[in-house]
Image (spheres, rainbow, N blue to C red):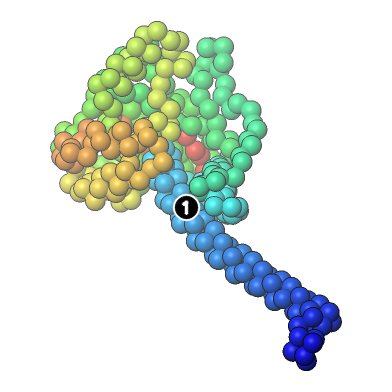
């Protein structure tokens, strides 16, 4: 056996070579694993951020549409694998200041986090002896709306309630009209700063359903809830010459963006309707007791519903 043959069958060299090969394999596996881990984390982060931003736009549009002068004021996201959960606060602009009225959660992503929620009802009048309205988390009533094309058995009127309240307050009140009005037909000469306009987004089939419910159910439950009425706000004092086109365009974009399929249906109903032909069903106004009561005395006001109340400072 020559010297080269002895080297080939040297047991120590073979063991060293095997050990060296194992070390290289371990290093390769560790390196590849770390590389895959980093790539997957970057991809997971990018996907989560994308869906988080998309969800925020959709839910912010939903909040702005279902809460008059409402918006998402703060969000805190917890990210998981290809998704996560967003905790957000809903605030409402009450003309002189904004207040948090509710806190919500939503899931987002390809594999959303599991959401478990518990709670109890927030309504009164379950016996049918009083209006079955609901409360927001901060204790404010949710406002009621009454469609002018539907004949209800009874209409809400909170003028007496507002008159009885003491102190310098700013009141949020939903006012439903006696009939649908185009802007050119609206007889009100002036409305206070930050008026929210309730828009007629209802199809004929939806109106038929509302009318049937009003006929067949108790008066205490037949009204349109605050989160079902859709509209947009005007920040400045309203007069008949106020241009609503810009706010209406933003309203259409919100309908198209919102997470709600009902809002997308409303968009399809409204997308080809010009602002001059849009029907206004009512308004939400903000003001002192005297300002609000003065507006409520207008003969076109069919119903009134008190929402939030804040101190006037």
Q: Residue at x 31, y 43 (%)?
A: 256
Q: Residue at x 18, y 41 (%)?
A: 275
Considering every residue shown, the one lying at the far bottom of the view is 3
Placement of 151 over or under 200, stated as above or below:
above
Considering every residue shown, the one lying at the far front of the view is 1
Q: Position of residue 302 (x, y in %)?
A: 32, 23
Q: Position of residue 292 (x, y in %)?
A: 38, 36
Q: Which residue is mark 1?
A: 51
251 or 261: nearer the eye?
A: 261
Q: Residue at x 59, y 45 (%)?
A: 113
Q: Residue at x 83, y 79 (%)?
A: 11
Placement of 233 over or under 205, stated as above or below:
below
**Image quarter for residue 284?**
top left
Q: Quadrant of the N terminus?
A: bottom right
Q: Position of residue 184 (x, y in %)?
A: 15, 37
Number of residue marks: 1
In this picture, residue 246 sits left or right of residue 140: left
Could you tell me if residue 291 is visible in this image? no
**Image quarter for residue 175?**
top left
In this picture, residue 307 sits left or right of residue 301: right
Placement of 303 over or under 5, stated as above or below:
above
For label 1, the SS is helix
Dot 1: few (<14), some (14–19), or many (≥20) neighbours within 10 Å? some
In this picture, residue 57 sits left or right of residue 120: left
């Amino acid at each position: 056996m020559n010297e080269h043959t002895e080297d080939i069958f040297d047991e120590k060299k073979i063991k060293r070579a095997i050990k060296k090969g194992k070390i290289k394999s371990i290093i390769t596996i560790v390196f590849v694993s770390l590389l895959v881990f980093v790539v997957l984390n970057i991809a997971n982060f990018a996907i989560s951020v994308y869906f988080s931003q998309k969800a925020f736009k959709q839910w912010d549009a939903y909040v702005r549409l279902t809460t008059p002068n409402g918006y998402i004021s703060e969000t805190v996201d917890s990210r998981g694998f290809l998704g996560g959960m967003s905790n957000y606060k809903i605030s409402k602009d009450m003309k002189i200041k904004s207040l948090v009225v509710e806190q919500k959660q939503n899931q987002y992503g390809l594999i959303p986090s599991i959401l478990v929620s518990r709670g109890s009802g927030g309504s009164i009048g379950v016996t049918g002896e009083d209006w079955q309205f609901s409360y927001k988390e901060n204790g404010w009533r949710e406002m009621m709306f009454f469609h002018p094309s539907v004949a209800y058995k009874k209409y809400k009127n909170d003028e007496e309630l507002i008159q009885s309240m003491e102190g310098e307050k700013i009141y949020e009140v939903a006012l439903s009209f006696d009939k649908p009005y185009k802007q050119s037909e609206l007889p009100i000469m002036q409305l206070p700063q930050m008026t929210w306009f309730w828009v007629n987004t209802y199809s004929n089939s939806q109106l038929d359903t509302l009318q049937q419910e009003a006929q067949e159910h108790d008066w205490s439950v037949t009204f349109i809830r605050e989160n079902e009425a859709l509209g947009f706000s005007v920040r400045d004092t309203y007069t008949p010459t106020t241009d609503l086109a810009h706010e209406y365009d933003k309203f259409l974009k919100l309908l198209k963006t919102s997470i709600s399929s009902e809002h997308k249906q409303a968009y399809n109903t409204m997308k080809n309707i010009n602002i001059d032909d849009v029907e206004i069903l009512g308004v939400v106004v903000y003001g002192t007791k005297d300002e609000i009561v003065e507006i409520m005395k207008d003969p076109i006001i069919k119903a009134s519903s008190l929402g939030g109340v804040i101190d006037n400072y």
